Image (cartoon, rainbow, N blue to C red):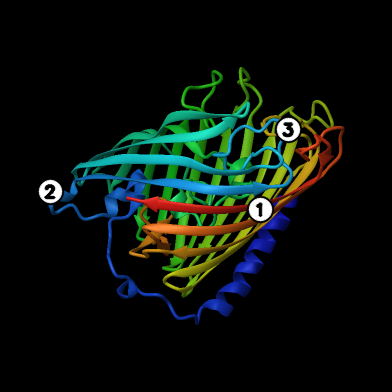
Amino acid sequence: MPIFRLITCLLWMTLFIIPALAGEKEISLSDLEDKGVSLQDLNPSNVEARSYDNPANRTLISGYLVTSFRNTDNGFPDAFGNETVFGADPAGTQEFGFNKLAFGINKRFSEYAWIAGALEITTHIEGGETQIETELDIGNINLMAPIGNGLIVTLGKFNSPVSFEQEDAPFLLQATQSLTYQFASPVKMTGLMLTYPFSINLEARLIGFNGWQVDGDNNDAKSLAFQLGYAPVYWVNTKFSYIVGAELDDNSRDLRQVFDLAATLNPGNWLIGLEAAYGREENQSLVNPGDHAEWLSGQITLHYDFVKYFGLTGRYSFLADFDGRADIEAAHRQKRTMNEVTFAPVFHISPDFLGYLGMGMIPQSQHLISGIDVRFEYRYDWVNETGPNTIFEDKAGNPVNNRHSFIVELVARF
């Protein structure tokens, strides 16, 4: 099966990359000027690791804002907003934008109880006019039951722990996100999450939730996710996730299953992200009606911090949709393979603390987070597809199979 070939390649890449980079000099915490509070506190599953001996630290308000200039040659026929992670801009976009304002509150009551909430205000273009949307991005109550090492119970809406990538802009290594992040796993979950740390480097997570990217349920079924996280050494984090549930509107019978393997490596000044995902949806093949729809996705991200003020990111990701998957909203259903490569230098204007990737108790991979990041991104997308329609079109409305994008993005956190 394709997933096993991809996982084998992923493991071989890991074995070759680790020895090559293990000797790099690390930027230590002592190199940083200000040990500021991390915006990752908006992530409820990381709050338990903080010290709350000082009552003044028990309530935290933080957030970030994003501004940008975007230039694209080709684009989407029915563009649905510049705030989307795939960058669904129309052809010929050349505009400045105030894209997002996010702010949240985290209240710690004790070592066994805390709450987290966050709002996002985003803008997008619809019919040539700017539309403003406000969303409850995070909202949950967290309790720790005194069972063994502590069973963490999270109830509400939270970021999905599946992918290597994070959603919030200060924790990204470039301006846009990969095809694997958007299409191969859920970004948000609303439901119940149980997290149990067996040790400092091994944890398990069980989640029951309404469905992918939905606050309320879109059918009579619920979805389940199981995840096992393992950190064999402090600079290597791995997690395997299995997700199953009926995800189509008003359809509680046809199950979607996803197997996802993600690894984050942090040798020296490098940060390396690897991810492979295989998905199958029952009775949803457009190519062979009545058969299952299958897809395969993967990404590799390489980031290097030359000095604490400057880093460089390169990424490749793909999504091979073998059967015309039902719910890729940006495109007509048909067999296609989407690819992208991204090159993004980033300037840390005030690199005042180390940020963390991932959720949970196990050692987290670190990378420099700045009070203000300036990112210059070049991205090239191309699509191999068979069918009467294409994802992209040029300014004249003609179908094309590629897109060039250039983005200048400023991200400021507070």
Residue 297, given in percent of the width and then of the height, sits at 68, 49
Q: Is residue 358 visible?
A: no
In the displayed structure, 157 sits above or below 31; it is above
Q: Upstream in the sequence, badge 2 or badge 3?
A: 2
Residue 378, given in percent of the width and then of the height, sits at 64, 57
Amino acid on which the number 3 mark rests in the picture:
Pro
Quadrant in which residue 286 is drawn: top right
Q: Mark 2 Cα within 10 Å, few/some/many (few <14, many 20+)?
A: few
Q: Mark 3 Cα within 10 Å, few/some/many (few <14, many 20+)?
A: many
Task: Please report contact status of discs 1 and 3: CB closer than 8 Å, yes or no.
Answer: no
In the displayed structure, 127 sits above or below 36; it is above
Q: Is residue 274 left or right of residue 292?
A: left
Q: Nearer the viewer, mark 2 or mark 1?
A: 2
Q: Is residue 397 left or right of residue 412?
A: right
Residue marked by disc 3: 77
Q: Is residue 275 left or right of residue 289?
A: left
Amino acid on which the number 1 mark rests in the picture:
Gly
Residue 298, numbered label = 1
Residue 94, given in percent of the width and then of the height, sits at 63, 45
Q: How far is disc 2 from disc 1 in space, using C-alphas? A: 44 Å
Residue marked by disc 2: 55
